[in-house]
Image (cartoon, helix red, strand yellow):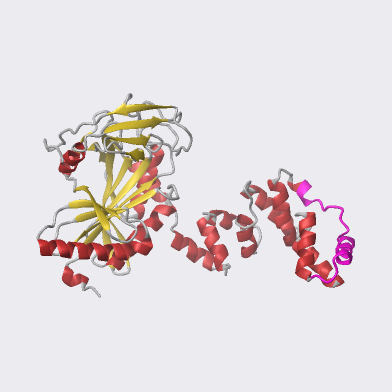
């Protein structure tokens, strides 16, 4: 067992999360493409001095690779991504989402933000830089051991998507370039792997409450780690909660070896599946930042700050507390939270006081063509009036999803179920009730309810 206090472990997180909007500096949709590009362009990128008048060490390192870059262009790209047109005004929806995230992180909002260029010459941006703006500062989250400082919340554009690489060149897709993305940076105030993991999960919960993209690749998380006698190291790709503690422990062991060999250096490393990491490049500094001159200062009004604070989304933990009151089946509760159906649940529970049924209607009973909430309200109203049996709701929803009106879906098929059951029992004697039920349900495919079939079979067997 490591003594993390004695080791002097200090750690902070950097989390990048794509927002579910169109792109940040143009109106192109934020879509990833799997088809063939419309055409390709080639570029070479050169390092430039930053605001300090120097070329950043990480930028200089990337420039030594001497690579040429090919960019695949799609019909969902425009001239902004090709760096043939100035950036448009910043995406206001993305700004509002970022402000909500900043509020949930207890941050102070800057009334004016300068959009900056961050020099990047690894080919991941056609311009040779990434646009970023510092939106909020000095916030915090609370975990079991106390408060963790949130140093900064930034709104920035995502990079192009790598496709292939060889010794002299690298190919990127321009589909992802320009996606709106929030970056959250904590202070170096976590001193055990468990604190790091808990903080990462807490920030993740806050992000998922807001309008962000979901799925693999939509969130990228880095961890900064140092111990006494060593230098800060940034590990990229620190995503998997199952591997977080292992990754931190292995980095501590690597830094201990570096201290013994007197070979410690500030660097960026990439996380590997076994918890170890590999060198990527030197640690970047402030020398790669300089002002973006093609867009005006970003002014954030008091009205916008107040509006976004007034309409904050609930966290999953708050939703879970609300759903707990209804005694929901745990698996149904998970589905409601996963499919983000809590608000719909609140509406429908006013119509009919059967929480588990409503949860099933919002999740298990839905098909690829979901039945919308206004139609679900009508179904529940008819149920309250005694015109629809609860046992028929699933079948009715399936018929509506196939294009039928509620009136058509409510019509009972002209089926003599008892006669049909007797016929199957005579044709296939000796089967179990479950087998007969499966045969009848399969034959009538949604035209009869499971309860109707079960009642008839109970009578006949």
Quarter containing the N terminus: bottom left
Q: Nearer the viewer, residue 129 or 390?
A: 129
- Label count reads 0
Q: Can residue 436 be spotted in the picture?
A: yes
Residue 37 spot, x, y in % from top left = 44, 30
Can residue 306 be seen here? The reply is: no
Q: Judge whether 424 appears above or below 46 on screen.
A: below
Q: Residue 132's image quarter?
A: top left
* Viewer-closest of 413 and 43: 43
Residue that sits furthest to the left in the current view: 262
Say whether residue 245 is magenta: no
Q: Residue furthest bottom?
A: 1
Quadrant containing the C terminus in the rendered view: bottom right
> Residue 431 or 366: which is nearer the viewer?
431
Identity of the residue drawn at 29% across and 62% down = 247
Question: Residue 82's quadrant in the figure?
Answer: top left
Q: Position of residue 436 (x, y in %)?
A: 79, 66
- Give x and y (percent) for residue 251: 23, 62
Instruction: Give the magenta-colored segment's residue range.
Output: 408-431
Q: Is 24 or 236 nearer to us in this picture?
A: 236
Q: Is residue 399 left or right of residue 370?
A: right
């Amino acid at each position: 067992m490591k003594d993390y206090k004695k080791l002097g472990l200090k750690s902070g997180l950097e989390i990048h999360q794509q927002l579910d909007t169109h792109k940040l500096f143009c109106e192109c949709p934020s879509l990833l493409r799997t088809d063939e590009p419309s055409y390709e362009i080639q570029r070479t990128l050169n390092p430039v001095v930053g605001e300090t008048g120097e070329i950043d060490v990480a930028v200089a390192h990337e420039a030594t690779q001497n690579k040429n870059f090919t960019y695949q262009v799609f019909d969902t790209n425009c001239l902004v991504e090709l760096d043939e047109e100035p950036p448009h005004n910043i995406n206001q929806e993305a700004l509002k989402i970022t402000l909500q995230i900043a509020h949930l992180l207890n941050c102070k909002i800057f009334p004016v933000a300068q959009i900056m260029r961050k020099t990047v010459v690894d080919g991941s941006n056609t311009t040779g830089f990434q646009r970023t703006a510092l939106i909020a500062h000095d916030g915090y989250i609370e975990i079991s051991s106390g408060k963790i400082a949130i140093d900064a919340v930034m709104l920035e554009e995502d990079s192009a998507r790598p496709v292939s690489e060889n010794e002299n060149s690298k190919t990127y897709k321009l589909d992802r370039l320009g996606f709106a993305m929030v970056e959250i940076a904590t202070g170096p105030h976590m001193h055990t792997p468990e604190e790091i993991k808990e903080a990462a999960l807490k920030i993740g919960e806050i992000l998922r409450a807001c309008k962000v993209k979901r799925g693999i690749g939509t969130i990228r998380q880095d961890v900064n780690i140092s111990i006494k006698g060593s230098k800060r190291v940034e590990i990229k790709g620190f995503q998997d909660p199952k591997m977080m503690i292992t990754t931190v422990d292995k980095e501590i062991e690597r830094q201990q070896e570096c201290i013994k060999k007197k070979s410690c250096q500030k660097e960026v490393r990439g996380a590997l599946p076994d918890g170890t990491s590999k060198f990527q490049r030197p640690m970047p500094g402030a020398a790669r930042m300089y002002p973006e001159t093609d867009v005006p200062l970003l002014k954030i009004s008091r009205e916008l700050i107040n509006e976004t604070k007034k309409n904050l989304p609930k966290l999953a933990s708050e939703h879970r507390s609300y759903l707990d009151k209804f005694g929901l089946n745990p698996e149904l509760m998970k589905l409601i939270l996963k499919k983000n159906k809590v608000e719909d649940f609140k509406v429908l529970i006013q119509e009919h006081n059967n929480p588990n049924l409503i949860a099933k209607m919002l999740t298990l009973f839905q098909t690829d063509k979901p039945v919308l909430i206004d139609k679900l309200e009508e179904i529940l109203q008819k149920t309250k009036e005694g015109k629809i049996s609860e046992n028929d709701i699933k079948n009715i929803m399936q018929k509506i999803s196939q294009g039928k009106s509620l009136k058509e879906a409510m019509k009972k098929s002209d089926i003599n179920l008892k006669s049909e059951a007797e016929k199957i029992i005579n044709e296939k004697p000796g089967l179990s009730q479950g087998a007969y039920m499966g045969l009848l349900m399969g034959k009538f495919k949604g035209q009869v309810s499971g309860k109707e079939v079960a009642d008839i079979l109970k009578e006949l067997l």
